[in-house]
Image (cartoon, helix red, strand yellow):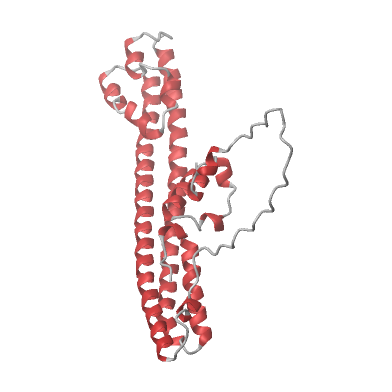
Amino acid sequence: MEMLKDGDGWEAQRRVLLFTVATLTASKTHAKLARAPQAQLERWREVEAQRQTADDGLVVAKARVAWADETLDEATADFHAQLFTDCKRDRAHPTFVRFFPDTLTALTRKGLDAQLDAMKDFATYGDELPLPDTSAKALTVVLAAMDDGRVALDGRAEAERELTRVSLAQAAWRDETNEVRRKVDGALGDHATAHTLPRAYPARFHRAAYETKPAKKKPAAAPTEPKSAAAPITPVDPAANLAPHDQVLALSDTVLRGLADEFVATLPTNVQAIVRARRAR
């Protein structure tokens, strides 16, 4: 019996266990042995509900970060324009330089966390410098947007922690399930011994997470006459030599968004998390 592994995929692991439960039940002789695996199936559904909730939470949290980022950029641009006007359109004005030592583009193209860090002293500058009412009002909008941005980032961090907690719950489920399957396999082996059945009898109740078919042999290529001209060079895809899951991660975000959810669910837990994060961008 092959043990479940992280690389087998979350959904594939459930199917392996479901096959065992269904086969034990169909045999009638071993129906009682199906109780423990069935309980693990129910536990899988509980963890899966947690995973979906955590995944949804991360999507929502990232959407809020994106919105907060855009909102802060707009407020910062408005403040930049107003302050520039109030400073007599003088980019070298000490007040203007204090807030914007770099260009507006350089500031707003930063990620939300980096932008907030770069603007962390805006409130202090607003208290220290005598700003015209128009600029002071625009700065108030910026500071409010910064507060919303921090809240959004905290929410994203918590959503990522929750996804990690669910990943640990999935790993624990896999370990528990492997132990249940070992016990079932041992009981089936004892039954086979007691009833003079083939040693491979327990294997009838298990299936691999990935069922592969033997590759078909390609017909031998017909001999060809040597050519004087050099054969054309065929470009080689650098991703072809990567492991299957690394090939998935090598795809562009656009292609990842087009992948079926059922396929993504067969990927390792950590790969699933990366794919879903990139699809949510």
Task: Mark yes or no: residue 119 visible.
Answer: no
Residue at 51 percent across and 86 percent down: it is 27
What x and y, as percent, mark residue 130?
A: 29, 16
Direction bottom: furthest residue = 195
Task: Mark yes or no: residue 3 visible.
Answer: yes
Q: Observer-nearest residue: 11 or 161?
A: 11
What x and y, as percent, mark residue 230?
A: 67, 28
What number of labels is visible? 0
**Position of the N terminus by quadrant:** bottom left
What x and y, as percent, mark residue 29?
A: 48, 90
Up/down of 121 relative to 215, above or below = above
- The picture quadrant where one finds residue 195 is bottom left
- The picture quadrant where one finds residue 124 is top left
Q: Observer-nearest residue: 174 or 3?
A: 3
Residue at 41 percent across and 61 percent down: it is 5
Residue at 52 percent across and 63 percent down: it is 210
